[in-house]
Amino acid sequence: MEQILTCHECGRDMVRDVRPHDVVYKDRKVTVQQPGWYCTGCTEAVLNGDDMGVMEAAFVHLKAEVDGILTPDEVARIRKKLGLSQRKAGALLGGGPRSFQKYESGTDWVTKAMANLLRLLDRHPSMIKEL
Ligand SMILES: [Zn+2]
């Protein structure tokens, strides 16, 4: 069921499309293929929740690289390697019961301190027993 949107700027139809979009963090830029509603008459674009997710995920990965922290995928990989549930990881490593759910879904950042702790545990997983 394809719906039609009307542009609130110029009144023309908006269509689904995928167009390049620059995501910028500090002095770095990546170009994502951004799905969204694009106006056939002007430059207006409307992004729904899933569309926003594409941009946000790209931003999270760029920020992780620039700031030297971990991506959501890396956080999830290390947590699973340590044999911890998201809830247990939050209780043991800090941040609260929902913190890892947020880190791994890209809705919150790991701190540099958490990133470094996870990197150490990634290299030395047996150290989890000492916490
Ligand atoms: Zn328009």
Image (cartoon, grey):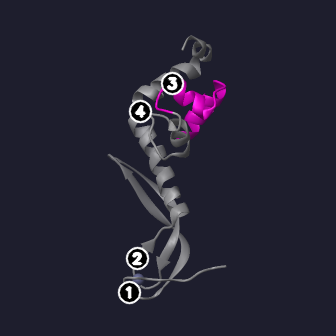
Q: Which residue is at the front of the view, 49 or 98?
A: 98
Residue range (magenta): 72-96
Q: Main secondary structure of the magenta part?
A: helix
**Residue placed under numbered mark 3 in the picture:** 93
- Label 2, ligand 1: CB separation under 8 Å: yes
Assign a secondary structure to mark 1.
loop
Which mark is nearer the camera, 1 or 3? 3
Q: Is residue 14 visible?
A: yes
Percent position of residue 63, x then y? 42, 43
Is tag 2's residue or tag 3's residue first in the polypeptide sequence?
Answer: 2
**Residue placed under numbered mark 2 in the picture:** 44
Give the residue displayed 54% in from the left and 36% down from the top. 100
> Mark 4: which amino acid?
Thr
> Mark 2: which amino acid?
Glu
Is tag 3's residue or tag 4's residue first in the polypeptide sequence?
Answer: 3
Mark carried by residue 111: 4
Against 100, residue 31 (above or below) is: below
Q: CA distance from mark 1 to mark 3?
A: 51 Å
Category of crowding for the residue at label 3, using alpha-carbon neighbours closer than 10 angstroms: few (below 14), some (14–19), many (at least 20): some
Give the residue displayed 48% in from the left and 47% down from the top. 107
Assign a secondary structure to mark 4.
loop
Q: Quadrant of the C terminus?
A: top right
